[in-house]
Image: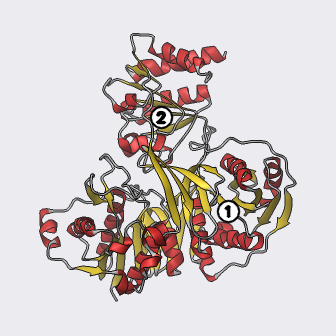
Amino acid sequence: MAEILVYVDHVDGAVRKPTLELLTLARRLGEPVAVALGNGAADTAAALAEHGAVKVLTADAAEFAEYLVVPKVDALQAAYDAVSPAAVLVPSSAEGKEIAARLAVRIGSGVITDAVDIEAGDEGPVATQAAFAASFTTKSRVSKGTPVITVKPNSAPVEAAPAAGAVETLAVSFGPLATGTKVTARTPRESTGRPELTEAAIVVSGGRGVNGAENFGIIEALADSLGAAVGASRAAVDAGWYPHSNQVGQTGKSVSPQLYIASGISGAIQHRAGMQTSKTIVAINKDAEAPIFDLVDYGVVGDLFDVVPQLTAEVQARKG
Amino acid sequence: MSLRIVVCVKYVPDATGDRKFADDLTVDRDDVDGLLSELDEYAVEQALQIAEEADDAEVTVLTVGPEDAKDALRKALSMGADKAVHVEDDDLHGSDVMATSLVLAKAIEKTGYDVVIAGMASTDGTMGVLPAILAERLGVPQVTLLSEVKIEDGKVTGRRDGDTASEQLEASLPAVVSVTDQSGEARYPSFKGIMAAKKKPVESLELDDLDIDADEVGLEGSWTKVDSAAERPARTAGTIVKDEGEGGKQLAEFLASQKFI
């Protein structure tokens, strides 16, 4: 059976959810072989085996943390050379996309980014993508070389599928470009204790209508009552009310949760591009004409300062 | 010696227009107004700021695209870039990121550069990988997705705000840089800038000038193929209620009915 290379996104050995989703997709195409790099790489093996990895190739070296992107490309290429896979799947993070694209150039393959689904096809894997602010759905494939495809979070379910997960050390030799861009300092993002925005099952977002950084507390309270991540529109971020890392939209994160709650967001194209593929959408807005209401499964025309706290209290009451 | 800055820009259909695909599944450019991709304005802005800081610098804007793509170059020139290079060839129609990056890399080498600056992604394709691919093709450091950038003493430094950490990066020139929309508002062209832009040189190149064969680019020469594009079905009209004191409770009831609570 064909082997499918899966690039593992992990934090010190803790595998992030999008990688487990990738294993589900990889199993549709062949036998997943995972590649885990950097500090804690070997600790990923148990979770990867549990979700279908037949093999886990690991490498750790100081270069992975000290230099940008290229050492990881060198390592993924080493894995590619060792395995000769039928396809390479990479999580669609900013870094993941760059790693995938550079690998594709090196191995003479086409690259597809931000797939939301992958199926096996007669002429290789078929990737589904959302285009033009998710107003179109396209199906594409790589027509030259070994398909390299990056996949967005929440594109497939996480499924238990125990496999051997045999750990092998990957030999990596770094090329001259590997040390080109030095990471001279790194400040980890402070954890909010909330789920990661792109991975969350529920996202609660606030926009212009929130009207001030100090008012985001009511958005956060609703999010916490639901175990949700917090998002913000570009207007709210540009006004300095909430960090850019939480921006949902064309120039921020693109999310596809089970439930998206938009509060005080009008629904400009810039924002829709980042949330239109959410399964269920609800909105709270004062303006009955706001375009966000064209997208919703349920909308409340009203003042978010009345509606959101009432909703939060009701959720808390129902959850007991 | 003069600091040679090449800014890669893209001419895209207006994101606020009714964008769609043409019959051959390429981006339809006929029915929607085109313009300089908004995210590339940030790249032009940073290039101009770096040039202003340097003793001696020259900013060249480069695009690969159809005749109308000159509009994007003209906008960048009116913001203050010194000259433009336009790669235009009928055989380029339908080129994917690999084909386009090949053309850009050759044109960048032909133009000569110390630093290449690009936006974080195009607003139509939205892949966000072109700068990394250019770095790979040119064999120079990649210093991408910067929200702050500085060039001094033959070095580029900057801040990259990632998902899990914010990183300070440093690389020697020549290098490929990309900047995000957090890097600073782009300037508006002044009337004087607009007038001056009309006199600035725009060099036109064809594939022959770059030693690229027609079969390396275009729909046929691309390494990916779009098999279908379908308009997403409009979302079915939802229930909309007016808050008359119970809006939050009604919403909770809906969420409970959908098993979210």
Residue B35 x/y as whole percent: 27, 59
Give the left or right position of residue A163, taking residue B134 as reference. right
Task: Name which residue lies at 54% across and 33% down.
Answer: A279
**Res. B46 image quadrant:** bottom left
Give the left or right position of residue B117, taking residue A195 as reference. left
- Mark 1 vs mark 2: tell me if same chain: yes
Residue B174 x/y as whole percent: 46, 81
Q: Could you give the CA–CA distance between mark 1 and mark 2, rounded to whole angstroms?
A: 36 Å
Of residues A137 and A248, the one nearer the viewer is A137
Of residues A81 and B219, the one nearer the viewer is B219
Vertical relation: A86 (above or below) B232: below
Give the left or right position of residue A244, taking residue A98 as reference. left
Direction top: furthest residue: B245
Residue A89 x/y as whole percent: 65, 58
Q: In the rendering, which numbered label is found on residue B126? A: none
**Circle 2: is it few (<14), some (14-19), or many (20+) Cα within 10 Å?**
many
Residue B142 x/y as whole percent: 52, 72
The residue wearing badge 2 is A205
Answer whether residue B141 is visible to the viewer in this image: no
Give the left or right position of residue A254, taking residue A292 as reference. right
**Res. B124 image quadrant:** bottom left
Vertical relation: A144 (above or below) A214: below
Q: In which quarter of the image is the N terminus of chain B?
A: bottom left
Answer whether residue A171 is visible to the viewer in this image: yes
* Mark 1 element type: strand
Going by the numbered disc 2, the residue's amino acid type is Ser
Chain letter of the residue carrying label 2: A
Vertical relation: A184 (above or below) B110: above
